[in-house]
Amino acid sequence: MSSSWIDQVKLDHYLKKLQQNDPKALAEIYQTMYPMVFHYTFSLVRNYEEAEDITQEVFLRINRYKHKYKVGTSAKAWIYKMTKNLIYTTMKKKKEIAYEKEKLEYLIDQQAILPTTDLSFVKEALDCLNETERQVVTLHLYGGLKHYETAQVLNIPYEKVRSIYTYALRKMEKQLKKGAFL
C-alpha cells in the first residue's frame, strides 16, 4: 500500500470522527495536513505570515464545514479545494491578484533539505511556469495529490492536468539545462 493511500484513508477516518464531534480528530487532521497545506498556500501568497494565517483559517473551516465532507471521497482534494478558495478570496479582498511572478521559496525552508544546499536552480525552474502549471506541479509533487485529485481542486479536466504536468516538467527540464544544472 502506498503512503498516499494510507494518508487518504487516515484523513477520511479522521474527517468522519470530526463529523461525530471527536475532539481529537481535528488535531490529527492538522498534524497530517498542516505542512502540505502551508506549502501550497505559501507558494501562492508568497508571504510567510499571511500563509500561516490562511493555513490556520483552513483548519477552522474544516471544522466549521465538516458536515459538507462526503465520507469516502478524496479528503485531500476537499481540503486543497477549500484552501485554494480561501486563498483566492483572501487575495481578491486585498486586491493582490498578481500570480505570474510568484516564487516557491518554501522549498528552502523544508526540513528535509540541508541549509547549505543551493536551491536557486529549483526556484528558477519553477519560475518558468505559469500559475496553473505551478499549481499542478506543486499539488502533485509536494501536496501528494494524484492527477484526478488535482483536477478536482483546480476544476479542470483530468486529461488537461496530465497534459499540463507533462508539459510543465519539460519546461522545467529545459530551464535547468539552460542553467547547466542537469
Image (tube, helix red, strand yellow):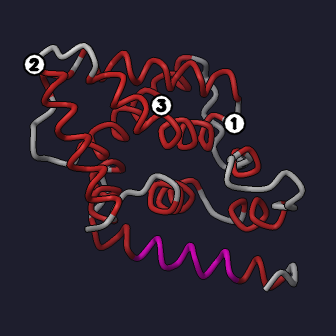
Q: Is residue 49 left or right of residue 132?
A: right
Q: Label 1 neighbourhood size at 10 Å, few (<14), some (14-19), many (20+)?
A: some
* Above or below, comparing residue 152 to residue 55 in the picture: below
Label pair 1/2, CB-CB below 8 angstroms: no
Whole-number angstrom distance, CA of label 2 to CA of label 3: 30 Å
For label 3, the crowd category at 10 Å Cα-Cα, with few meaning under 14, some 14 to 19 and many 20 or more, is some
Query: Which amino acid, by three-letter code, is at mark 2?
Result: Gln
Q: Is residue 78 above or below residue 179?
A: above
- Which residue in the structure is indicated by mark 1? 46
Foreground pick, 128 / 31: 31
Q: Hey, which quadrant is residue 10 in on the image? A: top left
Q: Quadrant of the C terminus?
A: bottom right
Q: Secondary structure at mark 2?
A: loop
Numbered-mark total = 3
Residue position marked by numbered label 2 in the rendering: 20
Choose the circle earlier in sequence order: 1 or 3.
Answer: 1
Query: In this orientation, which residue lies closer to the viewer: 163 or 18?
Result: 18
